[in-house]
Structures are given as structure tokens and as C-alpha cells.
Image: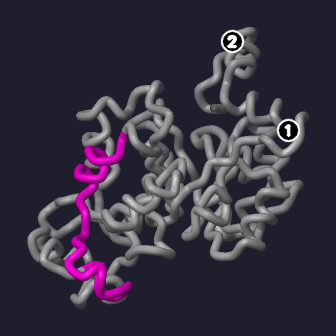
């Protein structure tokens, strides 16, 4: 990880034995290079996003990570939901931050996807950490952090309580479109990998990438702006690249050809044909 490497021989030693160097080495023997299979909001093509049903399905489908979206209730509970309103994925209406936790918990977050998912609840952040860490990696996306002052400190506290801020826990990553928020997270939990999300080509300039590399370990663009040159640029700065959101086999195959390190998909089976 660029932001954490020591100078001199320490760098060489770290790179020699790092998973990233092993990934590159595997490229020389064909198509065996490891690509992390990230289930976007869980296996959200098959179960309602950001619910236990979707995360359990991702585990069943042998994904490497689940990607989760974290926001905060009016009374301070960290909860998992993508949109800043509850309208699309629950039977409620209104802004997430205007609901007390018990009100959010009472909503049906599953029926919109199918009758078999009726009664699925909005999970809490600590519930997901306790249920899945050690079973599957967790890619934590902080949503709309500008709406929730102090959310970074709350997330850092939950991780520290479980010793998930330590370097041996490589299966925790934090990402956001709010890059200032990610700089803050890097200060709060400096040993946890940080990712910057973008769909803007303005963030792919040499200057922008160099700035990201001072605090981030992952550069995670939408697949529409991924090129082989971009992948090489990111790798040259000792960052990894994970791309989103894959909803077709063609998109998955394209990203595999580009040599990305992670693919974030609603369909884990498009990335891993074992399913």
C-alpha cells in the first residue's frame, strides 16, 4: 500500500511478499491472476440489496467481499441502505436521516424484490461486522457523509472495538465518493485500506492519481472510464483498482481483460464461473 510503505529495502521486502506482487507474478503464467469478486450490496441481483438475504447469498456464491452502504439514523445508529431516502427499497417514504432507528427497523426492505423476501429488515453496521467478518471481506462505502457529520468517527469506533483497524485484517476496505471523507478515514484508521470512488475522467489525470495515492490504496472507477492505460497508471502508483458496477457478462469480461484487481458486481457468478 503506497501510503504505508517504508523507504529503501523495506519497500522491496514488502513488495516481494505482498499479495499484490503475487497477483502480478501470476500474470506471467496465464489467466490465473487473482481478481477479488465483490458482491455489490450483497448478491443484489438475486436478493434485496443491503439485506442479510443478499449478504448470505454472496457468501453462498463464494464472493470474496460484500459491498455495503452505510448511513445514519436520526438517533445515531449506523444502518445499511444505499439511497438517501427509503422510498425505493422499503415500504416507507422519507429521508434516511429523518427516521429514528426503530422506525427504520420496522420497514419492509425485501418485498420490493419478491414476496419471498417479505420482512427483510434494514441491517445495522455492527450487525454486519459481527455476522460476516472472518467469513467474507467487507467493502464499506460511506454514503453521503456530508449529511452525517461525524460518521467517520462512528465507523472508526466500531472497527476499533472489534480490532478490525489492525493490519492483519486485510478483508476490510473503506471507500467513498467523498474524497475528503476518505482522507479523514485514513487519519482515523491509517492501517485500513482506503478507496476513492469516481465516475469522472477528471479524477484520472496523473496529478489527481498522485494525490489519491498519498492516502488511498484503491482507485475505484466506474467501468465506463477504465482503460488499460488507467490500470497501468494506478498500479504504477502502488494502488489497486476495483471497478463497478458489473451487470453483464460482457462488462465482467472487459474488466478481466483490463487487468483490474477487483470487480464489483450485482452478479458474483459473472466474475466467478463456479456459480
List x then y, in percent, for residue 267: 58, 69
The span from disc 1 to disc 2 (Cα, nearest Å) is: 24 Å
Residue drawn 68% across and 18% down?
Answer: 14
Q: Position of residue 79 (x, y in %)?
A: 26, 63
> Looking at the image, which residue is at 84% across and 45% down?
31
In the image: residue 123, left or right of residue 2: left
Q: Is residue 106 visible?
A: yes
Quadrant assignment for the C terminus: bottom right
Q: Image quadrant of residue 230?
A: bottom right
Q: Nearer the viewer, residue 79 or 55?
A: 55
Q: Nearest the camera: 258 or 232?
A: 258
In this rendering, the answer to whether 213 lies above or below 25 is: below
Q: Residue 119's spot in the image, x, y percent?
A: 20, 78
Point out which mark residue 67 bears: none
Answer above or below: position of 273 versus 94.
Answer: above
Tell me how the rendering is colored.
one colour
Q: Is 134 on the left or on the right of 21, as rendered? A: left
Q: Within 10 Å of the Cα at label 2, are there few (<14), some (14-19), or many (20+) other Cα atoms?
A: few
Labelled disc at residue 27: 1
Q: Does residue 198 appear to the left or right of 97 in the view shown?
A: right
Q: Nearer the viewer, residue 270 or 255?
A: 270
Residue in view at x 75 percent, y 52 percent: 260
Give the quadrant of the N terminus.
top right
Residue furthest front in the image: 274
Q: Is residue 130 magenta?
A: yes
| Residue plotted at (47% across, 72% down) | 44
Q: Which residues are magenta?
A: 109-133
- In primary-sequence order, the first of circles 1 and 2 is 2
In terms of secondary structure, where does tag 1 sit? Answer: helix
Where residue 117 sits, quadrant-wise, is bottom left
Q: Is residue 208 above or below residue 41?
A: above
Per the image, is 123 magenta? yes
Amino acid at each position: 500500500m503506497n501510503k504505508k510503505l517504508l523507504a529503501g529495502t523495506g519497500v522491496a521486502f514488502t513488495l516481494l511478499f505482498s499479495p499484490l506482487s503475487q497477483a502480478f507474478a501470476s500474470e506471467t503464467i496465464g489467466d490465473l491472476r487473482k481478481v477479488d469478486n465483490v458482491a455489490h450490496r450483497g448478491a443484489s441481483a438475486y436478493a434485496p440489496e443491503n439485506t442479510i438475504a443478499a449478504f448470505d447469498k454472496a457468501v453462498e456464491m463464494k464472493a470474496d467481499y460484500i459491498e455495503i452502504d452505510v448511513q445514519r439514523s436520526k438517533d445515531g445508529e449506523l444502518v445499511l441502505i444505499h439511497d438517501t431516502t427509503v422510498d425505493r427499497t422499503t415500504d416507507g417514504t422519507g429521508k434516511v436521516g429523518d427516521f429514528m432507528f426503530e422506525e427504520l427497523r420496522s420497514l419492509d426492505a425485501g418485498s420490493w424484490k419478491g414476496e419471498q423476501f417479505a420482512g427483510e429488515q434494514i441491517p445495522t453496521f455492527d450487525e454486519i461486522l459481527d455476522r460476516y467478518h472472518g467469513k467474507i471481506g467487507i467493502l464499506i462505502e460511506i454514503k453521503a457523509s456530508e449529511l452525517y457529520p461525524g460518521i467517520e468517527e462512528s465507523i472508526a469506533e466500531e472497527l476499533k472495538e472489534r480490532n478490525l483497524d489492525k493490519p492483519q485484517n486485510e478483508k476490510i476496505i473503506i471507500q467513498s465518493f467523498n474524497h475528503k471523507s476518505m482522507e479523514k478515514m485514513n487519519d482515523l484508521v491509517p492501517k485500513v485500506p482506503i478507496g476513492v470512488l469516481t465516475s469522472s475522467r477528471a479524477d484520472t489525470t496523473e496529478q489527481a492519481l498522485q494525490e489519491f495515492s498519498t492516502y488511498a490504496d484503491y482507485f475505484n472507477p466506474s467501468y465506463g472510464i477504465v482503460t488499460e492505460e488507467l490500470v497501468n497508471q494506478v498500479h504504477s502508483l502502488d494502488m489497486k483498482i476495483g471497478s463497478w458496477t458489473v451487470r453483464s457478462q460482457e462488462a465482467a469480461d472487459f474488466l478481466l481483460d483490463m487487468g483490474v484487481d477487483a470487480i464489483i458486481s450485482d452478479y458474483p457468478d459473472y466474475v466467478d464461473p463456479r456459480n
